[in-house]
Amino acid sequence: MMVYTKNLVLVCTGRDTARAAGQGMPVLHLCLGITPKGALQRLQLPTAQAHCLLGLCDPPLDLAMCNPERLASDLVFEAKRTGAPGVFADFEHDTPRGRALLSAFDTALHEADIPFFVPLACGRQLTHAVLTTPTALSGGSLTAYISSLQGIYGAARIAAFLQPVSQDFTLPSTTPNGKTLTKTERETLLAHTGAQAFFSRELCAKYFTYTDTDGRAHFVLFDDASTLEAKLAQLTGCGVQTVFALFPDAAELLNPS
């Protein structure tokens, strides 16, 4: 199977950044933060590789009053200084303060012609940013989901974050999230129950079912190298131009067996 890696951006922190840069692929370095007083700070030293996308971590919850426009200007300056081809705001909390910052960043980076990436959950109100959505779904169709977002925001404004899933759902499930399983736990469970794994083209993931000792039915949804390859292929087919993936989680995609 052909592995579609031309749109892949490796997301790294710390020592992994140098290893990822050695793959010869675009790298997003989560190296910037915001101090409680509202100033931009570098959390880690620059990587050996120039021209990394800059990753900005979530602002502190106790962030004092700050000037979003000044912070946005500093962010543009840092991106230009390092030759960054883009900025990713890795915001996890949708707060009024965070929305004000993202709005200022969105305007300033757009005027500077620097691509700006924001998680979909925090960036729906923005005008220019590329909205990044996780690929781990527990229902529906990955292709239909991506296509629906492209219909709302435009194809050029949707990117994806390739997040491997490995979850055990007790049926009937009342939440979209199950119990997280490690690879070892999942393989032990498969061997113990004798279950057979199947591939879901709609979810673009593998799954199996089993019954526990209390007679409860379970549904286990998981990714491996082959399903991540399939996700990349589907995303490419949908016209998604940028796909982020944590390194070294994506190592198997770069060096398939």
Image: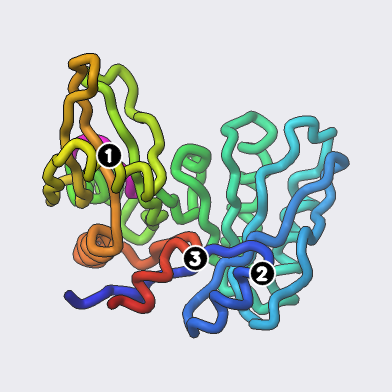
Which amino acid type is marked by label 3? Pro
The residue under the point 57% across, 74% down is 85
| Marked residue nearer the N-terminal end (3 or 2) | 2
**Secondary structure beneath label 3:** loop
Overall secondary structure of the magenta section: loop
Assess whether mark 2 and mark 3 are in contact (beta carbons under 8 angstroms): no
Q: From the viewer's side, name the closer residue of 90 and 185.
A: 185
The magenta span reads 134-140
| Marked residue nearer the N-terminal end (1 or 2) | 2
Task: Name the residue tied to disc 3.
Answer: 248
Is 27 on the left-hand or right-hand side of 75?
left
* Residue positioned most to the top: 214
How many C-alpha atoms fall within 10 Å of the one at disc 3: few (<14), some, or many (≥20)?
some
Which amino acid type is marked by label 2? Arg
Distance from disc 1 to disc 2, alpha carbons, whole Å, reads 33 Å
Q: Tell which tag, 3 or 1, sits nearer the viewer.
A: 1
Which amino acid type is marked by label 1? Leu
The answer to whether any part of residue 74 appears in the image is: no
Task: Name the residue tied to disc 1.
Answer: 189
Position of residue 107 measured from the top left corner of the image (x, y, whole percent): 61, 54
Q: From the viewer's side, name the closer residue of 15 and 66.
A: 15
Can residue 137 be found in the magenta stretch? yes
Distance from disc 3 to disc 1, alpha carbons, whole Å, reads 25 Å
